[in-house]
Amino acid sequence: MPSLEMRNITKTFFGKSANQNVNFTVGQSQIHALLGENGAGKTTLMNILYGIYQADGGEILLDNEAVLISSPKVAISHHIGMVHQHFTLVPTLTVSENITLGLKSPGYPFVHRRSLDEKIRSLSQKYGLEVDPTALVSSLSVGQQQRVEIIKLLYREAKLLILDEPTAVLTPQEVQSFFTVLKRLRSEGHSVIIITHHIEEVLAITDCVTILRNGINAGEVVTSRTSKEELSMLMIGRKLQREQRQPVLCSQDRTGLVVTDVALKDGRLGPISLSIAPGKIFGIAGVDGNGQKELAELILGIRKSQGGSITLDDVALDALGIHKRKNLGIGYISDDRLSDSLVLDMDLKENMLLKLQGNNRMKRYGLLDRKAIQACTEQAVKEYQIKTSSLSCPVRLLSGGNQQKLILAREMEGSPRLVVACQPTRGLDIGASESVHKVLLDLRAGGCSVLLISADLEEILELSDDIAVMHGGLLMDVIPNRDVDLTYVGLLMAGTRPGGMQ
């Protein structure tokens, strides 16, 4: 008997349909994937189930009984819990305090914290979610914070767990540990819904898959009876067309990016030296947090180097601010679009202007030209296939993938000479990732120097001419793509060079 059934769910935003007569069923003790492109309506459907949104039509049944879920509090009362893609923890509180936040625990208002800690510790061990209840959340890794979010739901006796893009922020090692947790939850009688666009993960861990495309049902399959090719077709409606790196004749009159002995005072980076010729992609692999973002921000001028130099086509950047560097033709795709790249309450046109406000094409008689801004944004939406109900729609209402496409469109304006791309496909589905790869290869073909920083080793191997590995703020080695040995790369990512030298 199904534990959950959603029938004919319909939801509209700003006149655009996000879900249209969607049906979704999850059985007991089942891991069920909700698969689809960015903007396909996956998160909207689950926000309706969790009570964040109210459906315009349709019904929800739990164990064959119709229920009205008007808020997350009501969802929790029905034993439904949700972990969002961006966690909702209070960093200054302990793990235990976060888990019990908002609950009247025994002894309230003078709770017995030690006994609560013990209960949480026991619960975490039962499901393989080991974490110290007394630790401050701010001291935890992203993977550990995710564990806290799951324990918080289990503590509230959730039986159906909704996990929104749960692996988007995890390292490959953390992903494997996370899969073990999911299997434990299933064996203990819980049902799990994973919102995702990663087909490999779907095939590795789930029992069933429901696919949404453009807000409607595109199919439902048993995982053991499907394939990557079938899921790709159902998800994007066509076969993938992978771009291939073609030989590029480098410009002889330009030097591209040259970084020499840059470092940070706090020791988190460097000294580092590298060069990227015009028409080349220089890929940096490594586990997040090993100085990759600091290097990108040094090149952009967000951080200041302790010594060394940075030049772009023989122009020294060291004394220049961020705005002047961008005016020289530098594009930047940050790994944190919400904090670094977008103003969420502003619309698409206003966000396009964040880099282009000084561009003469956007001005008329010294003032901003609204028609030019409108035309530029319309062109970006069309060229990058950004799904939005309106150019006046607040960016926060776009899916993560469509937000990333908007950033790409803005940063690629004006034929940049250097693009610094940090995790450019993080959170993107396979179709959108394919589009980003094409953009980067087109830039390369046009003579742009590209610094590609990615935790996705397959992406690095597919796109890069030269591959470096960062660990502990240092470049461990630089290898031409044709000479790459994956075992060697893995050792470098772990901080080990052949011969045992650290």
Image: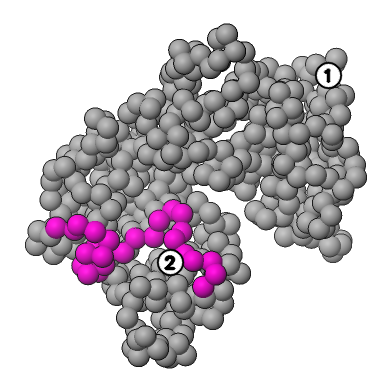
Residue hosting label 2: 149
Q: Residue furthest top?
A: 365
Asked whether 298 or 35 is in front, the reply is 298
Give the secondary structure at mark 1: loop
Relative to 174, say whether 109 is above or below.
Answer: below
Asked whether 373 or 58 is in front, the reply is 373
Relative to 502, say whether 224 is above or below.
Answer: above
Q: Is 87 included in the stretch rendered in magenta?
A: yes
**Crowdedness near tag 1: few (<14), some (14–19) or many (≥20) residues, C-alpha within 10 Å:** few
**Marked residue nearer the N-terminal end (2 or 1):** 2
User: Is residue 384 left or right of 210 when viewed as pictured?
Assistant: right
Secondary structure, magenta segment, majority class: loop
Q: Is 31 included in the stretch rendered in magenta?
A: no
Relative to 94, say whether 41 is above or below.
Answer: above
Q: Mark 2 to mark 1: distance in Å?
A: 50 Å
Q: Which residues are magenta?
A: 68-93
Residue 283, picture quadrant = top right
Give the secondary structure at mark 2: helix
Residue hosting label 1: 254
Task: Give the residue type that dot 1 points to.
Answer: Arg
Percent x, y of residue 188: 32, 75
Percent x, y of residue 70: 19, 57
